């Protein structure tokens, strides 16, 4: 029943796909803007500059 | 290179090379077709050559144990030399292809030199040879510096680097012989694919183990991009290359997929090869070398993370924009088109992040050609992704598809973005790894920059022109309702643009030639600075004190 295969794929892509990507975006935004993470990120961004050759 | 390994590691290397030689011998002797036998012979020859190298260094003194407290840069150094070698080869072949399109007689009358065989030598040479080696060289460097730890393996980095180059060699030598599975950017046949699998999994394990040993709490964002490149390329490579060989001793195999499924799998692969080979890895490069060179932290670290997840998860769905107006279901095409449009957001996130980082350091950009390479790369990255999103719209694609517009888009990305960011990174990395203060000749970097920029602009503008003209001529009807131009009319109209493109390519190649000379002279010129004491070392040594 190839028709069912196509219909199921369609349902999966339009249903699961949508919600999983929405959840993923929300998750990413929460992670990026979590209040405590600012300092960690600043540290990370500056860490590469501590003179490329000085540990 | 052999002297850096312990005796036991050297012996292990010899055992592996022995196995490899045996493999080559069995392939050559038991082959069912001549092409397979030739590749067996090549593998045997490489194994014997490398064995001589190892044997000649077998009795060298054991490396001092203190080396384990230092960064392991020898593999990156060899990778840099290989990068420049592949660049010259790939670009030269590319320019040959370009001249051949302008003057079809510029070839020899032999099957190996036909357009269809040397074109993939160009694409494989530049993408996998040049791009891949640049990614390996920089990823080894970046992961160590940002994690402040040594690579988590002594032998495996060499296995990854040399094994990967064997893959490139087998691929590029196969095309002139006529070995190909006819999937663009995945041309190598089953046995070469299997070999790449082994190499790539080793790369992944090495990278993960190094990350696990890090002395920094947070994994710097460049590593996320490199890791995405390694993980996704493994996945793409394995799925797209599932095939059944005709026999164990035959070079030909048949794909597990057929018809529209085959097309979809191939362009899921092809598009994500663009996304994760030509984009994610090079973004990793950008997020490390650009801030370091500009001496400013990345403008927004948050934005780099959001862009990362955006790119990683949205590119996966965009492959179907390569198959507009085909037998692929209409909704799948629409899905690919939609995701391509949304992709513009994280893509511009990265491009803007890079340019905003430079904001305030424009004097450096003006004075430092290396940083200028990276700035131009960020601009072309923004430009190419905008163009890509635009071309993914079905109606626009009906004009651009099959035309030179696609070729213009490809090379805006490949020359303007991939090659520019790579050269920028190499010019930062080369002096650092050989303990020099700067490149041998600042003037040569400057000359390379302007030749590369002129070459890229000429290439891209001529292809845009030619592509749009071609697309419009193909769809022009006369009053009687028939096509106004025959196909050969459009070919004639392309001719001047093809000459221009080939000239642009020659400029780009000349720039790379100067670059290779400069890298070589930097390596050869005597030490100008001595390493600052306690300088470039992993954090372990401090912790141990
Ligand atoms: C000297 C510079 C270069 C020249 C002259 C050149 C020339 C060419 C030519 C003539 C083609 C075939 C176009 C056609 O079939 O109509 C081509 C294809 C291609 N080149 Fe280049 N190239 C250069 C550099 C590069 C670089 C640095 C990269 C990648 C990093 C690259 C990636 C590609 C790819 C992916 C294709 C296939 C495009 C497609 O099928 O749509 N090229 N190149
Ligand atoms: C948001 C980002 C991007 C989007 C949405 C995009 C979209 C597209 C589209 C619609 C095509 C034409 C497909 C066709 O008509 O056959 C294409 C071709 C191509 N693009 Fe992009 N592109 C993007 C970024 C890039 C970048 C950064 C590169 C880097 C080098 C690149 C390399 C290529 C290549 C090599 C092809 C030719 C594939 C082939 O037919 O052989 N793209 N892209």
Image (cartoon, rainbow, N blue to C red):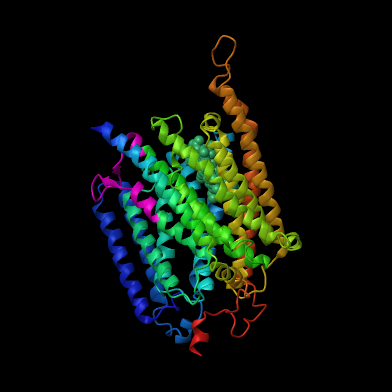
**Up-down: is B424 above or below A2?**
below
Q: Which residues are magenta?
A: B234-262
Ligand 1, by image quadrant, is top right
The answer to whether residue B207 of the structure is visible from this angle is yes
Give the number of callouts.
0
The spot of residue B322 in percent (x, y) is: 46, 37
Residue that extends furthest to the top in the rendered view of this protein: B480
The answer to whether residue B92 of the structure is visible from this angle is no
Q: Residue at x 63, y 48 (%)?
A: B380
The spot of residue B466 in percent (x, y) is: 62, 32
B466 within the magenta span: no
The spot of residue B353 in percent (x, y) is: 62, 57
**Up-down: is B143 above or below B478?**
below
In the figure, is residue B208 to the left or right of B505? Answer: left
Query: Is B406 or B20 nearer to us in this picture?
Result: B406
In the figure, is residue B328 to the left or right of B429? Answer: left
* Quarter assignment of residue B420: bottom right
Query: Is B153 or B82 nearer to us in this picture?
Result: B153
Q: Residue at x 51, y 75 (%)?
A: B216
* Quarter assignment of residue B487: top right
* Quarter assignment of residue B484: top right
Residue that extends furthest to the bottom in the rendered view of this protein: B545
The spot of residue B22 in percent (x, y) is: 28, 63
**Up-down: is B68 above or below B126?**
below
B249 within the magenta span: yes
């Amino acid at each position: 029943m190839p028709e069912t295969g196509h219909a199921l794929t369609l349902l999966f892509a339009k249903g699961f796909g949508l919600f999983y990507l929405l959840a993923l975006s929300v998750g990413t935004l929460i992670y990026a803007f979590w209040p405590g993470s600012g300092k960690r990120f600043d540290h990370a961004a500056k860490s590469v500059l501590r003179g490329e050759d000085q540990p | 290179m052999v002297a850096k390994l312990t005796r036991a590691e050297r012996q292990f290397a010899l055992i592996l090379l022995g196995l490899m030689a045996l493999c080559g011998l069995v392939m050559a002797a038991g082959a069912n077709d001549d092409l397979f036998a030739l590749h067996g012979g090549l593998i045997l020859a490489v194994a014997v050559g490398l064995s001589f190298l190892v044997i000649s260094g077998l009795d060298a003194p054991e490396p001092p144990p203190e080396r384990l407290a230092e960064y392991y840069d020898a593999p990156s150094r060899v990778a840099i030399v290989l990068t420049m070698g592949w660049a010259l080869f790939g670009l030269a072949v590319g320019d040959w292809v370009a001249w051949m399109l302008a003057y079809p007689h510029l070839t020899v009358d032999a099957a190996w030199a036909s357009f269809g065989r040397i074109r993939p030598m160009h694409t494989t040479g530049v993408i996998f040879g040049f791009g891949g080696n640049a990614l390996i060289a920089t990823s080894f460097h970046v992961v160590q510096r940002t994690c402040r730890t040594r690579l988590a393996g002594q032998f495996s980095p060499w296995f990854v680097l040399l094994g990967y180059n064997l893959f490139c060699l087998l691929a590029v030598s196969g095309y002139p012989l006529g070995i190909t599975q006819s999937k663009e950017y995945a041309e190598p046949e089953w046995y070469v694919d299997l070999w790449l699998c082994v190499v790539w999994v080793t790369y992944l394990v090495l990278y993960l183990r190094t990350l696990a040993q890090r002395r920094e709490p947070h994994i710097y964002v460049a590593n996320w991009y490199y890791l995405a490149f390694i993980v996704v390329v493994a996945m793409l490579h394995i799925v797209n290359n599932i095939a059944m060989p005709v026999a164990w001793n035959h070079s030909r195999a048949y794909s597990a997929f057929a018809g529209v499924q085959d097309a979809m799998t191939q362009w899921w692969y092809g598009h994500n090869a663009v996304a994760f080979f030509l984009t994610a890895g090079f973004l990793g490069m950008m997020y490390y070398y650009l801030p370091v060179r500009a001496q400013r932290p990345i403008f927004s670290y948050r934005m780099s993370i959001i862009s990362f997840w955006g790119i990683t998860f949205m590119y996966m769905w965009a492959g179907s924009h390569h198959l507009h107006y085909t037998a692929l279901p209409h909704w799948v095409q629409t899905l690919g088109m939609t995701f391509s449009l949304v992709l513009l957001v994280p893509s511009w996130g990265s491009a803007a992040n890079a340019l905003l980082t430079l904001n305030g350091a424009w004097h450096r950009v003006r004075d430092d050609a290396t940083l200028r390479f990276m700035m131009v790369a960020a601009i072309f990255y923004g430009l190419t992704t905008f163009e890509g999103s635009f071309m993914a719209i079905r109606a626009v694609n009906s004009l651009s598809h099959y035309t030179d517009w696609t070729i213009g888009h490809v090379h805006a990305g490949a020359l303007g973005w991939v090659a520019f960011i790579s050269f920028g990174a190499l010019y930062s990395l080369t002096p650092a790894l050989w303990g020099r203060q700067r490149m041998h000749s600042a003037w040569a970097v400057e000359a390379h920059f302007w030749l590369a920029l002129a070459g890229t602009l000429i290439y891209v503008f001529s292809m845009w022109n030619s592509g749009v003209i071609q697309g419009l001529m193909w769809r022009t009807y006369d009053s009687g309702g028939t096509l106004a131009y025959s196909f050969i009319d459009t070919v004639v109209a392309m001719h001047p643009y093809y000459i221009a493109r080939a000239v642009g390519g020659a400029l780009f190649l000349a720039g790379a030639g100067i670059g290779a000379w400069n890298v070589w002279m930097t390596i050869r010129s005597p030490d100008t600075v001595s390493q600052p004491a306690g300088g470039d070392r992993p954090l372990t040594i401090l912790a141990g004190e």
